[in-house]
Amino acid sequence: METNFQNAATICIVGFTAVMVILSGYAIVITILNKLNTVFVAKKRLKESSDAVAIIKPQFDDEIVAVISAAITSIVGKNVIIKKISFLQPTNPSNAWNDLSKTVNFQSHNINIQKRRQFNEK
């Protein structure tokens, strides 16, 4: 005849085993759903990118290059050679916090070009 302790141990072992099997099943289902979601998102992005009509490459006039060169020369204080000009990518509304953080970071450093020039001239 089994004792109460043996009954309790049997119930615990069976219960823990059942819980672990069920949790493992949930983990497998979640993994499969995650993989399916990744596949569907990739197909959706591929379809959206194939719907694009044309890719416009920027053309720079000599006037724009001259204005950019003059602006950089006035900031740096000496002649510069421009090797590459590229447009910044438009930001997504989801990156608004990121953009705000960068702005606050730049403002907190309080970088002043005029003070730096005076320090370098001494």
Image: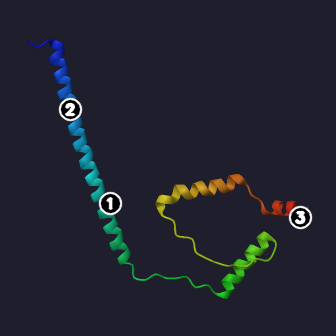
Q: Amino acid at mark 1?
A: Thr
Tell me where residue 44 sits by quadrant.
bottom left
- Crowd class of label 3 (few under 14; some 14 to 19; many from 20; radius 10 Å): few
Q: Residue at x 29, y 63 (%)?
A: 40
Task: Give the x, y percent position of residue 35.
Answer: 29, 57
Q: Name the residue beneath numbered marker 3.
A: 121
Q: Residue at x 64, y 54 (%)?
A: 105
The image shows residue 100, relative to residue 22, as above or below, that is below
Task: Give the x, y percent position of residue 81.
Answer: 73, 79
Q: Earlier in the sequence, mark 2 or mark 1?
A: 2
Question: What secondary structure is found at the residue carrying circle 2?
Answer: helix
Task: Give the x, y percent position of residue 9.
Answer: 19, 20
Q: Name the residue beneath numbered marker 1.
A: 38
Marks 3/1 in contact by CB < 8 Å: the verdict is no
Tell me where residue 34 sits by quadrant.
bottom left
User: Disc 3 vs disc 2: which is toward the camera?
Assistant: 2
Q: Amino acid at mark 2?
A: Thr
Residue 39 or residue 108, whichever sits in front:
39
User: Disc 3 vs disc 1: which is toward the camera?
Assistant: 1
The image shows residue 61, relative to residue 108, as above or below, that is below
Q: Earlier in the sequence, mark 3 or mark 2?
A: 2
Q: Name the residue beneath numbered marker 2.
A: 17
Task: Give the x, y percent position of residue 26.
Answer: 24, 44
Q: Residue at x 15, y 18 (%)?
A: 7
Distance from Cα at disc 2 to Cα at disc 1: 32 Å
Query: Does residue 83 appear left or right of residue 30 in this picture?
Result: right
